[in-house]
Amino acid sequence: MKFTILTIFPEMFAPLQESILKRAQDANLIQIKLVNFRDYAESKHKNVDDIPYGGGMGMVLKPEPIHRAVRDSQREDQRQRIILLSPQGRVFDQRTASRLAAYEELVFICGHYEGFDERIRVLADEEVSIGDFVLTGGEIAAMAIVDAVSRLIPGVLGKESSSEEDSHSGGLLEYPQYTRPPDFEGMKVPEVLLSGHHKKIQEWRRKESLRRTFLRRPELLDEAQLQTGDWELFEELVLEYPELASYRSKWEHLKPRSAKIRKKKDS
Ligand code: ADE
């Protein structure tokens, strides 16, 4: 997968040359190309910004250098996606990361300074924000997206690790993890994880994942990919957190018919 990043601050991207992303580039699983769109400025002083029409504070990125830079990187097929980073874009999430990972090339346009000329927007296939806060430019946002998308590319995380059990991958938060020692200053690793009982461990992890999601980000349950056995785990959790019962419609359809009939008889 190729990432082309249009920016006037290519030096900001040093973090992409470390750790897992460095290894992925060395293995040619991903390529990162930095394009300084100041090189596309025509004026003698290579100006990329100017004062805003209508007055106001700050400077605005000019349309010409960015248009020329994008034209130079543009391909004629559908496997390339041009993304404008801006706090006005759709908020990036794990689902967007998976969708973007299917392209062959992502081109990022990083705005900087106070804003960009509105005529830059027409270049983008989509506009993406990394959250409801304002950064000094799109560079850090681009890095976050390159990182999140890269780790979904097969081989990038290595053989042993997989992104499938990550927080958010099925719309749920990840279960708690432990390593040695089994007892750290009185804080014990849950017994079940030491048991070696694979099925019980899987079940515990799923339940803790549901618990975490409910306690920390209940709104994620609306979109989460729930599984057949989840209803039983939810019913167990309802006994601990009666407020969870108001979400029952989310997992009711997972109940096998026999369980529904049993419930009717019980009541
Ligand atoms: N540029 C400035 N703020 C941003 C944000 N939140 N997301 C993406 N790009 C930005």
Image: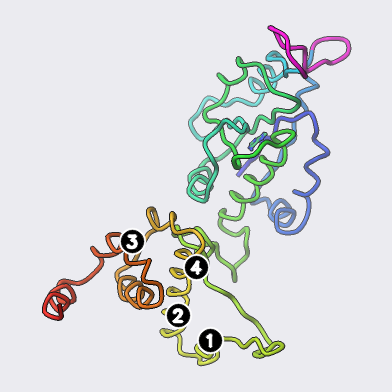
Q: Which residue is mark 1?
A: 193
- The part of the image, by quadrant, that contains residue 202 is bottom left
- Residue found 46% across the figure and 83% down from its top: 201
Query: What kind of element bears circle 3?
Result: helix
Is label 3 or label 1 in front? 3
**Within-10-Å neighbours for mark 1: few <14, some 14–19, many 20+:** some
Specify the label residue 212 is tagged with: 4
Q: Earlier in the sequence, mark 4 or mark 3?
A: 4
* Mark 3–mark 1 CB contact (< 8 Å): no
Q: CA distance from mark 2 to mark 1?
A: 9 Å
- The part of the image, by quadrant, that contains residue 258 is bottom left
**Within-10-Å neighbours for mark 3: few <14, some 14–19, many 20+:** some
For the C terminus, the quadrant is bottom left
Q: Earlier in the sequence, mark 2 or mark 1?
A: 1
Q: Earlier in the sequence, mark 4 or mark 1?
A: 1
For the N terminus, the quadrant is top right
Q: Which residues are magenta?
A: 42-58
- Residue found 67% across the figure and 22% down from its top: 72
Asked if the magenta segment contains residue 199, the reply would be: no
Q: Nearer the viewer, residue 162 or 84?
A: 84
Q: Which residue is mark 3?
A: 247
Specify the label residue 204 is tagged with: 2
**Within-10-Å neighbours for mark 4: few <14, some 14–19, many 20+:** some
Is label 4 or label 3 in front? 3
In the displayed structure, 39 sits above or below 92; it is: above
